[in-house]
Every structure is written in structure tokens, then in C-alpha cells.
Amino acid sequence: MIQKWFRLQEHGTNVTQEIMAGIVSFFTVVYIIVVNASILADAGIPFEMGVAATVFTSFIGCLMVGFWANTPNVLVPGMGVNALFTYTIVQGMGLPWQEALAAVFISGLVVTAISFTSLTDLIAKAIPNSLKHAITVGIGFLLTFIGMEKGGLIVSGKSTLLALGSFSDPHVLLTLASLGITLFLFVRNVRGNLLIGIALGTALAALFGGLNTGSGGETALSLADYGSFIGAMSFDSIGSIVFWVAVFSLILVVLFENVGLIHGQMEMIKRPDKFKRTFQASAVSAVSAGLLGTSPTISSVESAAGISAGGRTGLTSITTGVLFLSSIAVIPLIKMIPSSAIAPVLMIIGGLMIQGIREIKFDDMTDWFPAFLTIAAIPLTSSIVDGMAFGFIAYPLLKIATGKWKSVGIVSYVIAMLFVMNFVLHTAG
């Protein structure tokens, strides 16, 4: 039955290989439960609810992509877009998290509608490769910044915007020690290195009194409490400009980030024909994220770990999803994990994401300078969308200035105008 459903023989794999690949994927991406809940907590979402939302959304997302697309992708709340949700939409734009979840829901519906039309391929081809990579690099720098801030390595300065944290602060020392441990595991290619790093960082904090023991072991998650949390979206601001700026921002990030990631992962398994269905599953999963209480899902970078371990079909992603669901039993332990153990993971992920800078061609200033603006502006403005806007607006302008305007497709001009509108609406809001 399993052989027939997932067409294992056709994909050159077997049940054991697929399940093992799913386990590898889980242990490389399970850190998202803690990290995503921590970021959502900064938006005001209770940590326990954030953990549960992350678990259930990941479970449903993995099942969707496994059964609908039959690919080994892992759909989880995305790093980067969760920062957009918390630090830009909630803290920057001032939307309550309930209204931000409504924006996630609506943006998911729009991306889903796009995914079932030819617009997906049209948009994917219209985005210059330099800007695709620049977005990822910029998000990497932003995540690194957030990680260093959470770890106390950078603080607000008295005479400058930022300053180095105090090395007499135990929290800073614990962060540095956890970073050293996690990096050692990572460069040694230890499976589950990020998860093990979080566990060892937590143990180290426990030894030196840096554990979150205040509420960590009180009670397990009440499914009844989470049941009342589901659908906590609020559409009170649906008539405001700010709300629709948030929706537009989420659409741009979810659309562009997923297009780039899924294209790359389909190339890894040599099945570009599966791009459409995988993108569709990811889009529908983003709708469920709004309902379940978290930022949108994306096809995670860590999907590559399962693919590298031999995953070729949806059985890999379903295995990962089932493991996500089983992790709900250890939420009381998850709650105890300190930020000194989470911060190194953010920094390492950020470092991995900036490797895409090598793909940017630096022999043409009309290509690399817009990319540079995006890379610089995302962390410096703490806004992914604003950073993207700088690059997408500058790109056609520089092409026009050098007489290369015909090389820019009409879709790119439309996207640039949309970003200009985004700035105008943001100012008006």
C-alpha cells in the first residue's frame, strides 16, 4: 500500500530509507518549536500557545506536502517571516497579534489563489536571481542580529545605537559557551547538531542558574486552552491601511521565499515537475498557520537534510510531521529552554543564509547594487519588506539609467510599483 501510494520504486527509494530521512529532517528542524515560539512570544503570543501552534502547523503542513505533492519537503513556520510577523507587523506597525494572524490568514488565501494559476511561474521568472539571493542573505543578517540581541552580545549603546554587551554578564557568557558548543557540533556534522546544541546549552544554563525555571515545569499544555486559542484571529482592523500593508508584506515574503526555496529543493531531487504541487501545499499550509496561531509556513531550508539522507517522496515529510506531533508531550521541558541556548541557533542559521551572496554577480553594478541595498536594508531597518523594496525599486531604475530597460520584464516593473505603493501606504498608515 505504502509502496503504491508514494511510488517508492519509481523514485528509487524504500520505506526504511524514507523513514530514516524523515527522522533526520526532524532532528535538524525541531529547534523551530522553541525558536519560533520564542519569537512569537515577543509579539505577545503566550509561549505555550506558540509552541503548540508551531507543532500542529508543522504536522499539518508536512502531511499536506506529503500527500498532495509526494515530495520530501518539510513545511514549518519560517525563520525570517516569523521575524517579519513579530518585529515588523506587530512591534513596528502596531497591529495586535490577533490582527496580525488575520493578516497571515488572508495573505495565505491570496498566495493559495496564485499557486493554482500560471502567475506562480510568471513571478518566479520575473525576479532577478541577484535579488532572490539578496533577500535570503538580508534575512540571514537580520536573524543574526536578533540572535546576538537575545544572547546579550549586543545592547543599546549610550553614545551609539548599538554596543557590545558586558562580558561580566553571566547571560552573555552562557550564550558564548553555547555558541561554541553548537558550532563544534555543526562543523563536525553531528546529526541533530542544532537540537543537541540547544539541549547542551540548556544543561549548561542549569548548572549556572540561567534556566527558565519560573514556569517551565508547572503543567503540560492544556489542549482545551489551545483549542480556545485556535482561530484567535481578529479582523477589527481590516478596513485600515496598516492591515493591508501587513497583508501585502506577508504575500511578498511568503511568495518569493517559497518560490526560491522550493525550486532549489526540486532540483536536488531532480523533479522540477513537482514544483507546482509543492508550492500549492505550502500556500494552503500558510492559511492553516493563521488559523492555528503562528506566522506563515515555508518549505524549510532543513528539507535539504532529509533529501541528502535519501528522502525522495512524501513519506519522508509525513514521518517528520508525525514526529512533530509526538513532541507535544515534552512542552514543559521545552518551556525551560533559556534564550542563551536559542541565540546561537539564530546566529548559525543566519550565517548559513548569507552564503547565497556568492551567487550574486558583481561584474554588473545594475545587478549587484540593488542586491546590496536589499542586504543592507533588511537588518538595518529590521524590516524584510522594506529591505526588499529598496532592491526591487532600484533594480529597474538602474536598468533604465543604463539604457537596459528592455531587459526588465513588465512584471518586474509592476513589482517595483507595488513596493512604491507599499512605502506610500506605510507612510499614510
Image (tube, rainbow, N blue to C red):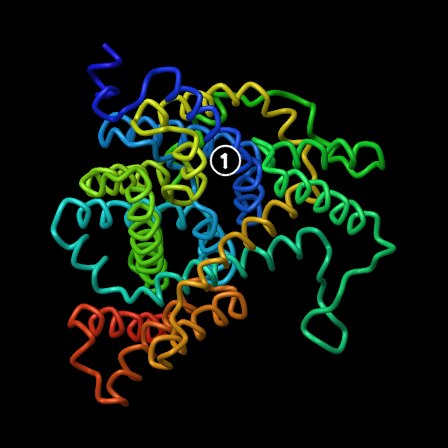
**Quadrant placement of the N terminus:** top left
Picture layout, residue 262 above or below residue 372: above
The image quadrant that residue 237 belongs to is: bottom left
Furthest residue in direction front, as rendered: 12
Furthest residue in direction right, as rendered: 168
User: Left or right: where does residue 335 sit relative to residue 284?
Assistant: right
Q: Which residue is mark 1?
A: 29
Which residue is painted at 69% across and 69% down in the image?
162
Amino acid beneath label 1: Val
Picture layout, residue 334 above or below residue 157: above
Bin the neighbour count of mark 1 within 10 Å (Cα to Cα): few under 14, some 14-19, many 20 and up.
many
The image quadrant that residue 266 belongs to is: top left
User: Left or right: where does residue 232 sit relative to residue 259?
Assistant: right
In this view, the residue in front, 97 or 137, is 137
Which residue is painted at 54% across and 54% down in the image?
350
In this view, the residue in front, 79 or 161, is 79
